[in-house]
Amino acid sequence: MALKIEEDITVLVIDDSTDIIVLIKAILDNELIHTICASSAKEAWPLLNKNIDVIVLDLMMPEVSGRDFLIEFRKLEEYSNVRVIVLTAESNDDQEIARLFEAGANDYIKKPFFPAEFISRVKNHANHMHLTKALKNYNMKLKKKNAQLLEVVKREEFLNKRILDRTFKLKKAYSKIEKLNEQLKYTSTRDKLTATYNRGAILTFLQNDIQRVKRLNTPLTLIMLDFDFFKKVNDTYGHRAGDQVLQSLSMVLKKSIREIDLIGRYGGEEFIIILPDTTLDHSLILCERLIHVARVNKIDIVKTVITQTISMGVTQYINEETIDQFIERADTALYQAKESGRDRYITI
């Protein structure tokens, strides 16, 4: 059972656009989240304090960019646990995103964004921050208990019953720490809305699988998957209904793949599925199954029932190509599937 940490949330927003700051503050105020705003990196430094859980940082700012601010910020030990979400433009590529993660970003979201997804990410990272604080507190308590135990043992002043009692309490403390560690690991790699892997995690898995292919010369197939006409769902039924569609179909897709396969949310309604030790030909059986389960999956939204078809681009790894090249080929195949009428897959 996951541990739930209930605490107030404080967010520092750094963006040179007044319109963006006003929008984000309105979104966060509606959720009773305390917001601190700065229009530049220079203005943000004096506003830093120990109560900040999450920083929402614009990538493109004059004078000091978001990435440069992030590099300097991560040098401050007292804020090492603060979560940073970077706002990026639609045009930023995977290499730029990778540089953000290297600089210390925990997540990113492209503008324009959906308020519901933005709030989910902020709350997810704030919860991660609170769990980290709780873990530190438990570690401090555990060290204190150990010191007390050692002191008592040195003096030879307590009875066997008290020793057993103290040992039992220490075991309980260790058990809580293990649960917190499990929760931290889960929240840092999962997309909160769909419970699939988040973009950072799925790209890390893909990079690791590519290295494995190079070492062992085994096949690796990649699927880029997109929900057909998903914008129409949001426009017709609202973003809450869109979230229901994402949750329902992603759960069905996750149940339909093999245990060794990995599925992650790449962005919006786009997903990546990694098929280790699988050739392109052998992946086609799974592709047919995914197309079928999407067609027959009934989703109850706003007093009506809809189905949501999918399109996929499928490709097998070619020796020595980069992760960006691999993803780009799968994305090209996905584009061809959409242009060919959707509700299908294309291989290249």
Image: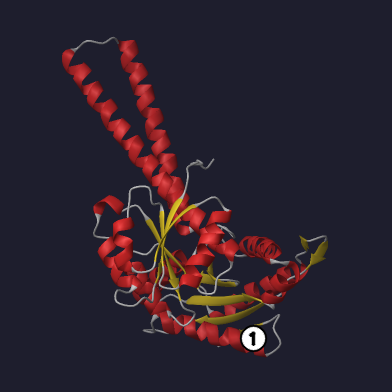
- Toward the left, the furthest residue is 154
Determine if residue 347 is in view. Answer: no
The answer to whether 217 is drawn above or below residue 243 in the figure is: below
In which quadrant of the rendered image does the N terminus lie? Answer: top right
Residue 263 image position (x, y, % from top left)? 54, 66
Residue 318 image position (x, y, % from top left)? 43, 84
Q: Quadrant of residue 194?
A: bottom right
Residue 75 image position (x, y, % from top left)? 24, 60
The answer to whether 125 is drawn above or below residue 154 in the figure is: below
Determine if residue 129 is in view. Answer: yes
The residue sitting at 33% across, 51% down in the picture is 49
The residue sitting at 60% across, 65% down in the picture is 257
The answer to whether 296 is drawn above or below residue 89 in the figure is: above
Residue 304 image position (x, y, % from top left)? 83, 63
Q: Quadrant of residue 85?
A: bottom left
What's under tag 1, amino acid-wise?
A: Ala
The answer to whether 296 is drawn above or below residue 314 in the figure is: above
User: In the rendered image, which residue does mark 1 sit on?
Assistant: 337
In which quadrant of the rendered image does the C terminus lie? Answer: bottom right
The residue sitting at 27% across, 50% down in the picture is 78
Looking at the image, how many numbered discs can be counted on the residues?
Answer: 1
Badge 1: few (under 14), some or many (20 or more) residues near its Cα, within 10 Å?
Answer: many
Of 87 and 34, nearer the camera is 34
- Toward the right, the furthest residue is 304
Coloration of the structure image: secondary structure
Q: Secondary structure at mark 1?
A: helix
